[in-house]
Image: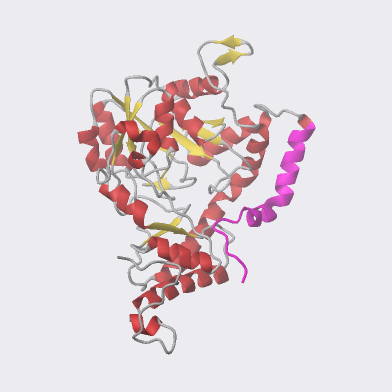
Amino acid sequence: MERIPFVDLAAQQRRIAAEVEHAIAAVLSRCDFVLGQDVGAFEAEFARYLDVGHAVGVSNGLDALRLALLALDIGPGDEVIVPANTYIATALAVSSVGARPVLIDCEPGTYTLDPRLLPAALTPRTRAIIPVHLAGQAADMDPILGIARSAGVAVIEDAAQAHGTRYQGRGCGSLGDIGCFSFYPSKNLGAYGDGGAVTTGDAYLAERIRRLRDNGQTAKYVHVEPGLNARLDTLQAAILRVKLPHLDAWNGERAAHAAAYRRQLADVGDLALPVCATWSTHIYHLFIVETERRDALQQHLTDAGIATGIHYPVPIHLQEAYAALGGHAGDFPNAERAARRMLSLPMYPELSDAQIARTCAAVRSFFETAAQPEAARRPHGQEGAAPRRPSSLPARV
């Protein structure tokens, strides 16, 4: 039986192949590979799409966060609040500028930063909060922004999974002081390699980020501060320009797939479906289900030829890279519970009705089999018999 991939980038490429080939050919004819005309054009188009003043193309999502922190002069001795449930790059950006990530727990339903925990995490050293818009929907930004403004700290949105998500009608990436995007190939808006963007309504911050991404220079060989080599490639910008006009339609297809999953899995016991926050649209970068039998379900789907993902199996405070923070199991129970239970089902615009139906049937069969009495699951003729143990394995004591 044909395998169902977790993400099918080739299917998307087939839909836009002619447009992409034309865009790449134009770059090759000009040979403006670094900060060429497609970079500036994409920045203007992406800023308009988000209804934000400025967008700056950069090399990847981690560098977007690093540049945001550098532009705000955050460094050694400073603290930045980060959710424990996020991809490690959110914390790595803080560490890379010499600051200390301060972790707080997530909300159990949306998996995003819990604003109620912010006041206790603030200290005189706090310089910024990085809420992460996770899986395709927004963190609850109004209370986060209110707390941040009262404390005099900046808000940097990690919008790597929120291309087109809207919070109370406003685009993610336009809500805080700075927004940071990744264009990793599997994102809703993905490049054909690494890429990212920083967005802001502040002209000074935008200009400084442009300078910092290009070795801190204002003109060739004129360097006014230490910077990074973190520019968005012109080829990637050209590809992103092709993809951006399709983004809303692709997000709509994802939402339709999510609705199909919900209909077909609505009555499956011991399976929690994604929670939709009242404050946010959902672009379903991921379709996450939860169960205490997550690992067994994943293996069942793998055996059925269906690929899945786990985001993220080890919270930041339990990663060896952050042992110095002194975290222990039990510190962030919601993040730890999510890490133990979350499973992402196949999700991409080109996913077919038949693939969704097959995935849902496999999920249902797992829970139906698990619900059967033990005797009913034994091979015929072995009712009442103890499970056989290979002779090469010792009995458990």
Give the x, y percent position of residue 29.
Answer: 79, 33
Tell me if residue 328 comes above or below residue 58 in the rendering: below
Residue 168 lies left or right of residue 300; in this view the side is: left
Give the x, y percent position of residue 73.
Answer: 40, 19
Image point (36%, 24%), residue name? 99
Question: Can residue 255 be seen by looking at this rendering?
Answer: yes
Question: Can residue 174 be seen by looking at this rendering?
Answer: no
Colour style of the rendered protein structure = secondary structure
Tell me if residue 242 comes above or below residue 344 in the rendering: above
In which quarter of the view is residue 139 placed? top left
Image point (40%, 47%), residue name? 134
Give the x, y percent position of residue 358.
Answer: 53, 72
Most distant residue in the right direction: 29
Please tell me whether residue 178 belongs to the stretch shown in magenta: no
Most distant residue in the left direction: 120
Image point (64%, 32%), residue name? 233
Tell me if residue 173 comes above or below residue 275 in the rendering: above
Region of the chain picked out in magenta, as a range? 1-29
Q: Choose between 119 and 344: the one closer to the eye.
A: 344
In which quarter of the view is residue 366 placed? bottom left
Give the x, y percent position of residue 246.
Answer: 59, 50
Quadrant of image for the C terminus: bottom left
Number of dots carrying numbers: 0
Quadrant of image for the N terminus: bottom right
Q: Main secondary structure of the magenta part?
A: helix
Q: Choose between 105 and 136: the one closer to the eye.
A: 105
In which quarter of the view is residue 393 placed? bottom left
Tell me if residue 4 comes above or below residue 95 in the rendering: below
Q: Choose between 325 and 348: the one closer to the eye.
A: 325
Residue 116 lies left or right of residue 372; in this view the side is: left
